[in-house]
Amino acid sequence: MTPRTVAFHTLGCKLNYSETSALARLFEGSGYLPVKFEEGADIYVLNTCSVTEQADKECQKIVRQALRRRPGAFVVVTGCYAQLKPHEIAEIPGVDMVLGAGEKFRILDYVDDLSKAQGKGMVHAGEVRDVNTFTSSFSFGDRTRSFLKVQDGCDYKCSFCTIPQARGASRSDTVESVLQNARQIAASGAREIVLTGVNLGDFGNGTEVLEGVRPKKEALFIDLIRELDQLDEVSRFRISSIEPNLLTDEIIAFVAQSERFMPHFHVPLQSGNDKQLRDMRRRYRRDLYAERVALTKRLMPHACIGCDVIVGFPGETEADFLETYQFLQELDVSYLHVFTYSERANTPAVEMPGVVPVEERRRRNQALRGLSEMKRRAFYQEHSGTERPVLFEQHKDRSLLSGFTDNYVKIEMPFEEGRLNTIAPVLLGQLNTDGEALQAQAAVLNAL
C-alpha cells in the first residue's frame, strides 16, 4: 500500500521551524511519507505565525498555493494564528482543519481519519490558558545547523504582543531532555545548534501548576548553557534571542569564556525612547540596554549584537523617533531587525491614542533599515584582515561556499571539495560586490 504523503510549510520564527520538524517526524513515524511542498501531497500542514498582519495574509496565500498543486488535498492549519483566530481560518476556502496550541502535537489523532466527507473547517482549539505542557522539538534536515526549542510561552504582558494569547504561559523543557536532544542533533551531523524559545531567558519554568502556584524553577538559563557547554559532541551553540533584563552579567561573562557558545547575542530593544518602552510595558529602560551592550563589548570586543526595533508605536512622535534613531546610531550594535507596528486585536496598544499614520511608519522603517545596513557593513569591515572560524555552508552559487564566522559575519569564498559542514579559520577580506558578505580565503588547509 502506497503511504499517504504530507507536506509542510512554516511561517514565522525559528521556533516554528523547530516545531514543524517535530511534526514531520511524528508523521514519518506513523508511516506517512513527508514530501516537499512543491511536489504536491495528500495532506498539507501549515504552521502559522501571527506577529504581523502580513503573516495572516500569507496564510491565505499558502493555502491557495497548496490546493493549486494538489486539488482535493487536505489542508490543516496550526500555529499562533490558528490559536488566535481559529474560526476565521476555518472560513478560508480549502482549509479542512484548524488545530490550536494545545492540539498541535496531537495532530495525528485528528488527521488519521480525516476525509472530505466530514466537511470543511473543523476547529480544535482549546483555551490557551489550559496549555500547560511542553513538547520538545528541533529542526532537522539541514546538516549544518539545527534550531532546538527549549522554552515556550511567555508570562510578559507587552502591550503590542499577541504571543501570550497564542502560546500560553512560560514553560520549559528539562535540562536532561535538552542535553539528550542536543546529542541526537549532533549524531545527525549538524555542527551548530541554535537555542530557541518564545522568551528564552525565562528558561526553567515547569509545566505543572498546582492550586494556581507555579513551582520554583529547578534550573535557570545559565544552568542550562553551562551543561550544554560540556557536550563534546556539539561544536557550536548560539542563543537565538534573549530579553535585555534576562541577559545577565553572569550569562555575558560565561559566553565570553566559552569555546562552544558563539560571541553573538540578539537582544530585543523595541524602542530607544523610555516613554515608548513604558507604554509598551517592557521590563527595562534604555539605560539597562546600553549597559548590557557595553559589558558585552568590553568582554568580547569582536561580539556581534543584533536588536529588534518597532517603529510607529502609538504615541511615537517625530521627536521620539529621532531619539530612538540617535540612541541606536551611538549604540555599538551590529545590525537591526526593524518592524513596523501593526494593530493586533485584543492588545492594549490598539486602544492607545496617538496613532501614527501608516506612511509615516513606513518612512521610519526605511530610515532605520538604512542605519542597520550602515552598521552591518561597518561591523563587517571592522573584521577585514582578521582570521575567524567559519562553519561552511552551501552557497546559492554552486561555484562558491557560504558560511558564518563565530561572531556572525557572513562570508563567501571559492568552492572547495570537502569543506561543506566543516569548521575552519579563514582570512576575512573585503565586502563582496553586493555588500552582503566578506570575501574570504582559507587560513589553513585542514578543517577542524
Image (tube, grey):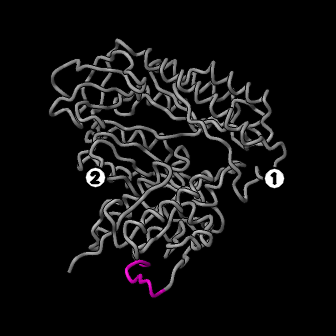
Q: Closer to the camera: disc 2 or disc 1?
A: 1
Q: Secondary structure at mark 1?
A: helix
Q: Which residue is mark 2?
A: 184
* Mark 2 or mark 1, earlier in chain: 2
In the rendered image of this protein, does residue 361 appear above or below residue 50? above
Residue at x 51%, y 48% (from the top left corner): 203
**Residue 183 or residue 412, whichever sits in front:** 412
Image quarter where the C terminus lies is top left
In the rendering, at what x and y percent does residue 155 appear? 63, 53
- The image shows residue 384 at horizontal and vertical percentages of 38, 14
Whether residue 274 sits left or right of residue 217 in the image: it is right
- The part of the chain drawn in magenta is 109-118
Marks 2 and 1 sit apart, C-alpha to C-alpha, by 47 Å
Q: Residues within 10 Å of mark 1 (few under 14, many from 20)?
A: few
Q: Residue at x 78, y 29 (%)?
A: 318
Give the answer, above or below, for where 24 lies relative to 303: below
Q: Main secondary structure of the magenta part?
A: helix
Amino acid residing under circle 1? Glu
